[in-house]
Image: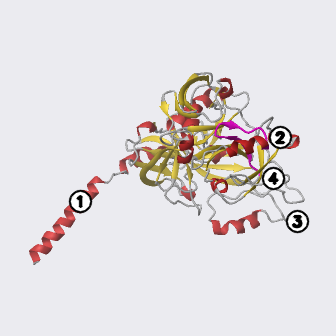
Amino acid sequence: MLKNVKWYFFLIVLFTQSVLAQLPDFTEMVKTNGVAVVNISTTQKALPETENAPEEEQPLPEGIPPELEEFFKRFLNEQGDGYAPKDTTSLGSGFIISADGYILTNHHVVKDADEIVVKFSDHRELTAKLIGSDARTDVALLKVEAKDLPAVAIGEPNKLQVGEWVLAIGSPFGFEQSVTAGIVSAKGRSLPGGNYVPFIQTDVAINPGNSGGPLFNMEGKVVGINSQIYSRTGGFMGLSFSIPMDVVMNVVDQIKVTGKAAHGWLGVQIQDVTRELAESFGMKKPQGALISKILPGSPAEQAELQIGDIITEFNGQSIESSGDLPPMVGITPINDKATLKIIRQGEVKTINFKVGLLPDEINTLADAKTAPKLPHNRLGVNVIDLTDAQREALQITKNGVLVQDVAKGTAQSAGIQRGDVILRIQNNIIRDAADFEKIVKKLPTGKSVAVLIQRQGNPIFLAIKVDK
């Protein structure tokens, strides 16, 4: 019996040693690269004191727990004779990319800062100059007056594999030189507000203050800048997102030359192809970026792209979802010639165009007002003609009908809402309410049809299955 117990424990020890031998050891990587990671603090000077408190609310410091947000809002924005304006500060991370003092961080870390102070691992503090930043990619380039600084090595994010170990160093909640590790969860993620960045998703613990810090691969090279987290609490929940270094260095090279970054532009609004939409377009599987709008004067308009075209390739690279396209176009040099492969009404076509410069601002459209109802039709949707005032407000020169009411049924389930403007049904342009009724009567029963609508200025394709 005693021999069996000893043998059992011997097997446990062997198993434990085997597992530990497979886990990565980050100690040498941290020793080598930790000295190149810095803490960044910024100060935004308060406006001169006035008799009354400012009309706008003061921003909350980064990292405030949700349960204390209301308290801090009242404290920071309290009005009264004793009001005294205060400087606001924020904390973030960064890392040195060259021995002569160039430092990378996030745009949102240094946005609107009047003073930027960089604290090094040896506790030195230097004031940094903002060379330039780019809000669309959330990248900022700083410079300090120093020599012989320890710098990181830049890696190749394209070679990262899902499941690969990665390491982050930063200052979460102000705790400098904190190290966390995890694996790559996904690549090429598209996030709201991050259309020009194919994010690296990891499960590395990233918290407020980690922003701007480096993400290392197992070779000790930086493959990304830690930028965002998805969280319902404000803290880490296993979803962290980093900007790939190929995107970052493209921005850095431009900033060094011109002080800002330019992005390639096609000039379309796009959406994913759902299973229902794929069926309505006669596709075997959902794939590509579906064009729901073409902006006036854009390269897309000049290339004669059409609403309803589905982009499946850009310069030979496959487009699996709509989120794949903007980063590819964005990093393409301005005025370069590019090639698209599209599906138009079931036929594969090749379109050539010249990449344009993404404008600073792209106009959005206004909401429409409603008018009297008309009887229901097969789809259970009441529509009316748009007035001249409504067309002007919506920037719609012709075509389209306004949804006045939606009854329970397939159209409502598909997402049609009151106030939507229906522009097309299954590649048929809707000119007026009479045109709409005529086309709806001819729709095939039991099949999904693609409906192009405009909602709050944004065109969207929806798939409706006609069941009667």
- Residue 213: x and y in percent read 53, 47
Q: Position of residue 229 (x, y in %)?
A: 55, 54
**Disc 2 secondary structure class:** helix
Distance, label 3 to label 2, CA atoms, is: 50 Å
Q: Are marks 1 and 4 in contact (CB under 8 Å)?
A: no
Query: What residue did someone put label 2 on?
Result: 391
What's the distance in space between the residues labelled 4 and 2, CA to CA? 19 Å
Q: For the residues carrying marks 4 and 2, which lies nearer the camera in this image?
A: 4
277 lies above or below 268: below
Q: Secondary structure at mark 4?
A: loop
Q: Earlier in the sequence, mark 3 or mark 4?
A: 3
Which residue is denoted by mark 1 in the rendering?
A: 17
* Depth check, front residue: 455 or 82: 455
The mark total stands at 4
Task: Indicate the amino acid at tag 2.
Answer: Arg
The verdict on residue 16 being magenta is: no
* Percent of width and height locating residue 180: 45, 55
* Sequence-first disc among 3 and 1: 1
- Residue range (magenta): 419-433
Q: Where does label 4 land, which residue?
A: 374
The quadrant the N terminus occupies is bottom left
